[in-house]
Amino acid sequence: MLRMADNDAGLEAAAAAIREGGLVGCPTDTLYGLAADIHNPSAVAAVLAAKGRAAAMGIPVLIADYGDLERVAAEIPPEARLLAERFWPGALTLVLKRAPGLSDALTGGPTVAVRAPNHPTPRALGRLAGRPITGTSANLHGGAPPADADEVERQLGAALAVLLDGGPAPAAQPSTIIDLTRTPARLLRRGAVPIEALRAVVEVADLVEAGR
């Protein structure tokens, strides 16, 4: 594993590793994430193996800009556009119908969970690598939240090609997750964006309401 500072040289090395099918640990606007090429089946399998995570759970996807959404989603409803315009880049994950080119190993089913993070590093990696990247947390499944590069190295160091050290993560709340494949949209996980803010933009069914 190559551990580098989160700077231009580090980003170039990390992007090259992603293009070659390697795994990269990097800071995000919440915790440290595990970045890989979403279109490389071997890389996706390596992410799942490194974390000890079942493929049926799916892996979140990070995009650099709103324009990349069409690369991962088959349909972008008006509600998705409104929410992205209001909350991206930021800690809101949208669940949409996946694009045909995405695999079951990545998404775990017919939908994809995607967001544009409010942190320059994962967005720069996506641009430099020329593709969306995985956005799952850089820890073993069920392990301690990876709040700094030392914790990432302790848990996943052996699986990484490059680890970008950007100092302590913001330790913010996880992203809010909203399912836009149904009407009304459904809140799947509470997080940094409160449901009241979402409801100021679109109709959203709460977790309790959705479970009835």
Image: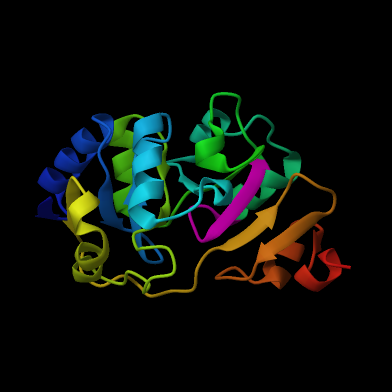
Q: Whole-percent x and y of residue 50?
A: 33, 52
Q: Is residue 79 left or right of residue 169?
A: right
Q: Whole-percent x and y of residue 115?
A: 52, 49
Q: Eyeballing the image, is 202 above or below 37?
A: below
Q: Eyeballing the image, is 29 above or below 65?
A: below
**Residue sticking out furthest to the top:** 101
Q: Is residue 118 left or right of residue 77?
A: left
Would residue 197 be visible to someone looking at this image?
A: yes
Bounds of the magenta span? Answer: 87-96
Picture quarter containing residue 108? Answer: top right
Based on the picture, tell me whether residue 127 belongs to the magenta stretch.
no
Q: Eyeballing the image, is 45 above or below 158?
A: above
Q: Is residue 86 left or right of residue 105?
A: right
Picture quarter containing residue 45? Answer: top left
Q: Whole-percent x and y of residue 58?
A: 54, 47
Q: What residue is shown at x 31% (from left), y 72% (from top)?
A: 147
Picture quarter containing residue 46? Answer: top left
Would residue 200 be visible to someone looking at this image?
A: no
Q: Eyeballing the image, is 29 above or below 16?
A: below
Q: What residue is shown at x 18% (from left), y 69% (from top)?
A: 150
Q: What residue is shown at x 52% (from left), y 29% (from top)?
A: 71
Report the front residue among 187 and 161: 161
Q: What residue is shown at x 14% (from left), y 40% (from top)?
A: 13
Q: Is residue 135 left or right of residue 100?
A: left
Based on the picture, tell me whether residue 88 belongs to the magenta stretch.
yes
